[in-house]
């Protein structure tokens, strides 16, 4: 595939494609290429209500970012975009079904209650108090207006109320909880006879031929995974930065440039927000007229602002530094003198009237205090630019080179090697799935090309090539012979002991012998978590049915190379006090479990009954 790209990148096909794109753009514009996005196309209709493409794409973006955040090393190439889109659409359909059901039941949440929820959300608080700045930034990053976010929160809250109501409606009888606790706290009495593997050791013989035959018949259990030996180069931001020297003059110059920023000027502002709507222009004109007549800004904010969180405070947004809100709001705010009002100012959230309430500045730290940080910042910035430049050049050079020796020389990088790189469980940098996927691709593995330059982290990139390929193959018999021998010896030992155990169990069940006396060890009041007994023995003892009065139940369990015969004599349920906290907690747990199942069935029913249309 890479060779095809190399061959065709400057060829006739590429030129034809480019020509077609140019003609399309010149005649019909960008819509000819990407399609028109005027209007509100829908991706699905649920009982007549549209799920718009804009809403859908926003949720896809949020879901994609969420899955990337869950990765230890975020890599978009590892995401299954088709599955994400499918999951998001289904979740939106389900959310719409639930929202419609809530509306049919008359459930609603007013704007004041929604705002109370927002104010109380920890992600919007600074030092325990609501931060308008943090809220605005969060909503903006989602690509929403505050109104859209409130509507989304309102729908989710109402749907969760339904879920909570159904789950809490789950029922579990106290007797079921008591019985389960009694079983969990159960203890058992039994006797054990251990049939020691050493007692039949002289009867167990495993020959070289046995080992070889078993190996031949079970080679698939001893496969050595496919692997490659590689050469690779690592371009690291840290290494680039280590080579950068920052002079004292550069540091001083940057300090002088930052003098205004270092004073940390903050401006306290208030605003009146008018969101787009049918009567938006009329309200803007009314506000403007009232301001010209000398009306109080805070009172106008309380009366007209569509940002209810700040409106309650007279529009006060608190202190902001330049860049906190950005765009037209920042530009207007930092052009005002104290007490002045700007507006109308257009932003992505709507139309603002902005009043500068106060300006405050702190003392700038000294040059000596700031010099180390400034030097590090300058070095990091220069290193970032240089790293980006080198990364682009190295990617191009590695793409066109037949090996990695020349790129290593040009960029003064160490040509490193690694043997035995497999498809899984490798050390860095070969723990990156994208790099491994390329190493084992046909272009690299079979045709001998270099991989692409892969960003294995935010600060390092790797290009590699395969020098040797070892296909999957069975491990040599010599490496696994001891393992096979041990296995066969154990199997044959347990087989011989099993014959003895069957004879013993037959005698016990027929009453020919009693489970007591020589060779038997009694255990009383054994619980499930007994630490001094082997797990398989305890598991078998607790799997046997309870015996009647004066009776026994018998079984056997493996313990290493020994076989243990079990004679169960008694079962005692745990003592559970009626009405105890344990019973109450277990009843609550079982009820919630039942409620969850009922809610899932409820949602499935709504979803099955919904009329869903997709274009």
Image (cartoon, helix red, strand yellow):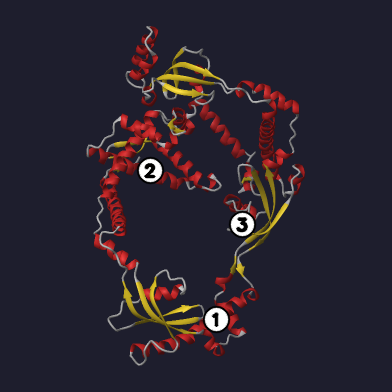
Q: Nearer the viewer, residue 562 or 420?
A: 562
Identify the residue position indicated by label 1 in the image: 488
Which residue is pictured at 41% across the width and 22% down the height? 350
State the residue position of label 3: 426
CB atoms of marks 3 and 1 within 8 Å: no
Residue 82 position (above or below residue 152): below
Image mark count: 3
> Which residue of the protein is positioned furthest toward the left in this rendering?
105
Relative to 162, is 172 above or below? below
Residue in the foreground of this view, choosing between 327 and 55? 327
Q: Is residue 14 left or right of residue 580?
A: right
Determine the CA span between mark 2 and mark 3: 36 Å
User: Reading the chain from its start, which is encountered first: label 3 or label 1?
Assistant: 3
| Residue 271 in sight from this viewpoint | yes
Q: Earlier in the sequence, mark 2 or mark 3?
A: 2
What secondary structure is marked by label 3? loop
Name the residue at 30% across, 84% down.
Answer: 551
Report x, y in % for residue 487.
55, 78
Q: Is residue 39 visible?
A: no
Q: Which residue is disc 2 drawn over?
A: 89
> Does label 2 or label 1 sit earlier along the sequence?
2
Which image quadrant for residue 455? top right
Density class for disc 3 (Cα within 10 Å; few <14, some 14-19, many ≥20) is some
Neighbour tally class for label 1: few under 14, some 14-19, many 20 plus, Cα within 10 Å:
some
Residue shown at 47%/16% (left/top)? Answer: 356
């Amino acid at each position: 595939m890479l060779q095809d790209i190399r061959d065709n990148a400057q060829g006739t096909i590429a030129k034809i494609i480019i020509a077609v794109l140019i003609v399309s753009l010149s005649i019909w514009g960008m819509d000819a290429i990407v399609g028109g996005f005027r209007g509100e196309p829908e991706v699905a209709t649920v009982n007549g209500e549209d799920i718009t493409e804009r809403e859908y794409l926003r949720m896809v973006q949020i879901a994609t970012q969420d899955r990337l955040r869950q990765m230890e090393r975020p890599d978009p190439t590892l995401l299954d975009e088709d599955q994400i889109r499918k999951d998001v659409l289904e979740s939106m359909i389900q959310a719409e079904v639930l929202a419609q059901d809530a509306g049919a039941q008359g459930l609603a949440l007013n704007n004041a209650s929604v705002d109370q929820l927002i104010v109380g959300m920890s992600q919007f608080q600074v030092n325990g108090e609501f931060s308008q700045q943090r809220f605005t930034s969060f909503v903006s990053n989602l690509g929403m207006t505050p109104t859209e976010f409130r509507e989304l929160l309102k729908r989710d809250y109402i749907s969760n109320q339904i879920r909570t109501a159904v789950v809490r409606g789950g029922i579990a009888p106290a007797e079921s909880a008591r019985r389960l606790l009694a079983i969990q706290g159960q203890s058992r009495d039994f006797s054990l006879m251990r049939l020691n593997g050493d007692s039949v050791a002289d009867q167990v013989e495993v020959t070289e031929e046995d080992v070889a035959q078993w190996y031949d018949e079970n080679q698939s259990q001893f496969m050595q995974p496919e692997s490659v030996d590689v050469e690779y180069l690592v371009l690291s931001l840290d290494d680039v930065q280590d080579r950068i020297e920052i002079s004292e003059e550069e540091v001083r110059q940057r300090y002088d440039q930052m003098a205004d920023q270092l004073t940390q000027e903050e401006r306290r502002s208030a605003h009146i927000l008018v969101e787009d709507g049918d009567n938006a222009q009329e309200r803007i004109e009314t506000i403007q007229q009232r301001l010209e007549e000398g009306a109080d800004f805070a009172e106008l904010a309380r009366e007209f602002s569509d940002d209810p969180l700040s409106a309650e405070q007279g529009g006060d947004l608190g202190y902001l530094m330049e860049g906190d809100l950005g765009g037209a709001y920042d530009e207007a705010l930092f052009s005002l003198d104290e007490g002045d009002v700007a507006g109308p100012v257009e932003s992505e959230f709507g139309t603002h009237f902005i009043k500068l309430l106060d300006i405050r500045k702190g003392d700038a730290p000294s040059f000596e205090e700031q010099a180390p940080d400034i030097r590090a910042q300058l070095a990091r910035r220069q290193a970032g630019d240089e790293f980006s430049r080198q990364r682009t050049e190295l990617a191009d050079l590695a793409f066109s080179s037949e090996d990695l020796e020349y790129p290593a020389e040009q960029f003064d990088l160490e040509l490193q090697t690694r043997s035995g790189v497999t498809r899984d469980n490798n050390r860095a940098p070969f723990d990156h799935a994208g790099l491994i996927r390329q190493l084992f691709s046909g272009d690299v593995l079979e045709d001998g090309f270099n991989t692409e330059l892969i960003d294995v982290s935010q600060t390092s990139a790797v290009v590699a090539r395969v020098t040797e390929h070892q296909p999957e193959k069975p491990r040599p018999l010599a490496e696994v012979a001891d393992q096979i021998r041990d296995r066969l010896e154990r199997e044959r030992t347990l087989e011989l002991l099993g014959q003895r155990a069957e004879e013993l169990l037959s005698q016990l069940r027929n009453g020919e012998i009693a489970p007591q006396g020589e060779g038997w060890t009694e255990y009383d009041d054994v619980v499930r978590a007994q630490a001094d007994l082997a797990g398989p023995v305890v598991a078998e003892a607790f799997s046997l049915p309870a015996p009647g009065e004066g009776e026994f139940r018998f079984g056997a369990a493996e313990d290493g190379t020994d076989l243990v015969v079990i004679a169960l004599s008694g079962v005692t349920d745990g003592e559970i006090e009626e009405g105890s906290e344990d019973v109450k907690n277990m009843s609550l747990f079982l009820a919630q479990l039942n409620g969850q199942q009922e809610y899932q069935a409820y949602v499935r029913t709504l979803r099955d009954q919904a009329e869903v249309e997709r274009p």
